[in-house]
Image (tube, rainbow, N blue to C red):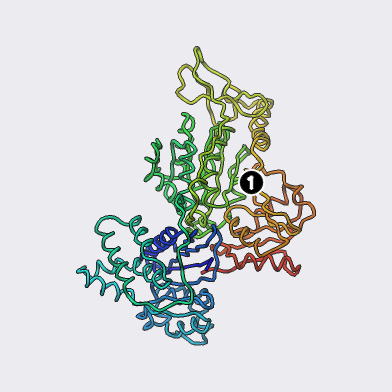
Amino acid sequence: MDDFTWRVGGPQGGGIETAATLFARAVGKGGWWVATRREYHSNIMGRHSYLDVRLGRKPVQAFREGVDMLVALDGETLVRHLGEVRAGGVLLYDPRVLELSLHKLPMLDHRLAEAVEERLGKRDPSLKEILSAHVEAGVQPLPYPYEEVAERIGSALGVPSLQARRTLNTIAVAASLHLLDYPLEPLLEALALQFRGKVLELNRAVAEAVYREEVPKLPFRLHLNGYEPGRVYLTGAQAAALGKLAGGLRFQTYYPISPATDESTYLEAHTAFRGADVAVVQTEDEIAAVTMAIGAALTGARAATATSGPGFSLMAEGMGFAGMIEAPLVVTLYQRGGPSTGLPTRTEQGDLHFALRGGHGEYPRLVLASGDILDAFLDAQKALAWAWRYQTVVVHLLDKFLASSAQSLPKEALRVLRLDGEKRLPPQEGFGPYARYAHEGDGISPFIPLGTPGGFYWMTSDEHDLEGHITEDPVLREYQMEKRMQKLKTALEEIPEEDQYTLFRDGEVLVLGWGSVKGTVLEALEELPGVGYLHLRLLWPFPRIAHLLEGRRLVTLEHNYSGQLADLVQGETLKKVHHRVVKYNGRPIALEEAVAALKAILKGDAPERIVLRKGV
């Protein structure tokens, strides 16, 4: 077995994420490359959530809708994922749920319940009948009484029933790995990473007890894959946080908002890494977050803020202020489903136009989008360096899928980049006032932090002259606008091509993508001879790519309704995008549906707009 997907589903707050982390760490300890995908409801407790762990003998990034093993911790999981376990796959479930019927699942959406009733041709079918539908699809059902096992093991260990039932996630993982004939030792190592003290002792004892039980033989086995030390396991949000630390971050602000909060709370918990000297401040709102970060930057500290769509909307005025006074600022934008509150915990790439143009008036900003978890680490460093080099706003785009997905990476790939080029004047005798906004043709002015002994300048959000005094003189207005916007030309000339875009493969059909579609497209190419992929990282200033598009049938693939990248490409290159493949239901593009859409385009019988609709 070279490729395997394990999915666990159950009520939010029921230990689903802990179970997936344990499984991922256990198989990672056995040498498998892993990636996890997390889907969860925006309420706090009770609603359905699930996580996928995909493992392979080589690094994996994309996810499949068809899974090999589904672990159902409640009855709703049997219903929601009907049809998503591949033929020959395994369903591990608690037989007690078979006593329920469809309408006794209080959190199940009415639309989904009606769809299941229509599929089975029966009103309010029992879960036993739904299980039969799994079996008819070629799925092997394996009843496993999680709570009964927990109580039996707890009794043998002398542990109260309630305490024993808190180990259900460990029981589910141990049972899955035992069924797959996977060794116990890597799981025990994973437990040691997850728990401490008496909690660890209990979970170790439970795992060992599960492994002592007899289990049926499955048609597939999961063996060790030759463990190689030196791998790390990170989410996208964690990678961005560590990248900021590697890039010299000194000050981070945030107001809590999903899914951006994960980055800042991770920073709060890990600022002691390697002597990092970072202040992380939770502010009263996003307006305070952006303006406080600007204030910190003016004192010379590398500063950033992190937010999601609604918070980014509130930051627009502050970003314009930073653009006018030429303050270096990084805004990390974790995109989620919109508009308004939208889908707080689901993915989308709907903020591209806003990231490019948000705010009134014009000022230079750089927009950089990460395509995977390693990119998130490296790009966070680049964003900080570019903000200081060009003394302006850098918007670093990620999305919810990337933020909450996790992946194992070789530790050596997390390298610290050596990036410099900022124009900072050292303190000098008799400094006095100086021309803060003068430049030498590149648009970038010498900078002194506030508080530099002997030096000062004027600063205002109004238009100003070279010293910072307010002016409405038309000649000075033109000079300052042209001076600021020159930074974009300078950046486009200086930023290396590999940081702007990567042509992974050329082809008559050329897919253009940005952000988290990267891993899916790269794996899809393995099944699509004749298809190329151009991945864009720097989205503004827009790279000079028109020559790469000449004579190609162009396809964009993105998580939004309108095809925002297609609009941008057509506007900047005057090259027609022939097919827009879009998905906007809040779930990431699965490998199967990307391959199917691109195969249809290759055959020549696809419409100009293709909507992908998979996902639960």
Q: Position of residue 245 (x, y in %)?
A: 45, 40
Residue 163 placement, left or right of 445: left
Residue under label 1:
539
The crowd level at tag 1 (other Cα within 10 Å; few <14, some 14-19, many 20+) is: many
Q: Position of residue 171 (x, y in %)?
A: 34, 69
Q: Position of residue 294 (x, y in %)?
A: 49, 35
The secondary element bearing badge 1 is classed as strand
Q: Residue furthest top?
A: 430
Q: Position of residue 488 (x, y in %)?
A: 65, 36
Residue 101 placement, left or right of 443: left
| 541 up-or-down from 160: above or below | above
Observer-nearest of 354 and 528: 528
| 171 up-or-down from 425: above or below | below
| 534 up-or-down from 443: above or below | below
Q: Residue furthest bottom?
A: 122
Observer-nearest of 322 and 306: 306
Observer-nearest of 298 and 313: 298
Q: Amino acid at mark 1?
A: Leu
Counting labels gives 1
Q: Residue furthest right?
A: 551
Q: Residue 357: which quarter of the image? A: top right
Observer-nearest of 297 and 286: 297
Q: What residue lies at 67% left-to-right and 57% top-to-bottom?
A: 556
Q: What residue lies at 47% left-to-right and 56% top-to-bottom?
A: 406
Q: What residue lies at 60% left-to-right and 39% top-to-bottom?
A: 365
Q: Residue furthest left?
A: 158
Q: Residue 29: which quarter of the image? A: bottom left
Residue 393 placement, left or right of 105: right
